[in-house]
Image (tube, grey):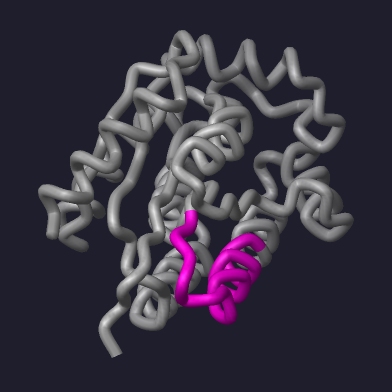
Amino acid sequence: MKQTNHFVAVEANIAAGKTTLLPRLAEALDWDAIQEPVEDPEFTRLLTEFTQNPSDSSKRVNFQRYITERRAEIVKHLPKGRNYLIERSLYSDLIFTQANFLSMEQPDTDFMLHYCEIQRKLREYPVISAVVYLRTTPEVAHDRLLSRGREAENGTPFEYIRNIHHYHEAILPQICESMNTPLMTLDWNEFGCEKEVGKQLMDILARAK
């Protein structure tokens, strides 16, 4: 059965401002916000292990696999009569997995196996009606990460934030093009107005029909 409701993904670097924008934009649109499970103890445990051991590929892939499973599961049983704004999508997992794989001195094949898992899950994932990409410089994203002071993120190096920025810039447009997903890129070094973002988004969705 053809999907009749919208799933719009807000994609961005770590600490770019997704969590701040998402509930405000969802309220402006009268949509439902689906945020990442940052309060989930298992999420916190795996993220802490990763940030404290950034060169340990097993810690990276364990965290990424958990996120992918949660991301795929959370959208399965949502009511079909509502529209949803989601904080990151499986598109993000493709980006992070490639970034992790290619940034390692000895790439771990588990990352590419996981990449294939994500592609399989995309076949059953809701169609992403559009992506809102919040573009920040790595410096701004890193400053915001330090300012929000999440304990599990302690130790995240600037170099990692910089790499994730470059991979978003290079890979996200390719993913959106391959999936026929409209991409809306916003300069988010300064927070914008959620009502204006909502207007732009609705214009894009109307043109995509």
Give above or below for 189 relative to 159.
above
- What percent of the width, then of the height, locates residue 30? 50, 47
Q: Residue at x 68, y 57 (%)?
A: 63
140 relative position to 128: left or right = right
Kindly indicate the quadrant of the structure image that contains residue 78: bottom right
Q: Residue at x 45, y 51 (%)?
A: 92
Kindly indicate the quadrant of the structure image that contains residue 118: bottom left
Quadrant placement of the C terminus: bottom left
Relative depth, front residue between 77 and 161: 77
Q: Residue at x 45, y 11 (%)?
A: 189
Kindly indicate the quadrant of the structure image that contains residue 43: bottom right
- What percent of the width, then of the height, locates residue 198? 37, 34
Q: Residue at x 76, y 42 (%)?
A: 53
Q: Residue furthest bottom?
A: 1
Quadrant placement of the N terminus: bottom left
Give above or below for 109 relative to 183.
below
Give above or below for 31 relative to 3.
above
Q: Is residue 167 visible?
A: no
203 relative position to 19: left or right = left
- What percent of the width, then of the height, locates residue 200? 26, 32
76 relative position to 119: left or right = right
- Residue 101 drawn in magenta: no
Relative depth, front residue between 173 and 21: 21
Number of numbered tags placed on the structure image:
0
- Residue 69 drawn in magenta: yes
- What percent of the width, then of the height, locates residue 71? 58, 65
31 relative position to 66: left or right = left
Q: Is residue 199 visible?
A: yes
What's drawn in magenta, residue-wise?
Answer: 67-84
